[in-house]
Image: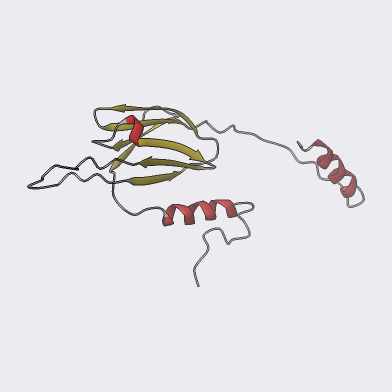
Amino acid sequence: MTSRVFASPLFLGFDHLEQMLERAAKSSSDGYPPYNIEQVSPVGLRITLAVAGFTMDDLQITQEDNQLVIRGRQTDDSQGRVFLHRGIAARQFQRAFVMAEGIEVKGAWLDNGLLHIDLARPQPENRVKTIRISTSGEAGATIEEDRAELPK
């Protein structure tokens, strides 16, 4: 039996986080291509992947729900060539990053064999909301009012 991270009744509505953690753990443990993640500003992140030998046409970046997926597929152009040693393989890859809600992909560029992807992490708003305490006879009316104000 596995232990659930957010099994405590004090964590309300965090079951989707547990699913994201499971998805991240299942993602490829292959170390190819190597990558860096750096913080470039208080709200900016940059993922850099070493994709030497790949052209822009060989690479694809997609955002699938809360996952950033980078795929690379090279064509094997070794027809008619004789290699005495082949240490540079034409291989494909898929690297996925699970992103928190609200993170936006700002852009991507390829430079000297490095694929850079810039992300923006919005700063959370600090909100304080006072909840009115009513008597038991008023509870139903309060719930009705709250439901009417919910966005559709």
In the figure, 35 relative to 21: above or below?
above
Q: Nearer the viewer, residue 53 or 49?
A: 53
Residue at image coords 29%, 40%: 74
Residue 88 place in picture, x, y as percent: 18, 44
In the figure, 27 relative to 70: above or below?
below
In the figure, 142 relative to 113: above or below?
below
Residue at image coords 87%, 44%: 144
Q: Nearer the viewer, residue 145 or 111?
A: 111
Query: Quick one: which residue is furthest to the bottom in this view?
Result: 1
- Count of marks, rendered view: 0
Please indicate whether residue 149 sits to the left or right of residue 16 in the image: right
Please indicate whether residue 95 sits to the left or right of residue 13 in the image: left
Residue 81 place in picture, x, y as percent: 13, 42
Residue 104 place in picture, x, y as percent: 50, 32
Residue 141 place in picture, x, y as percent: 90, 45
Q: Quadrant of residue 80?
A: top left
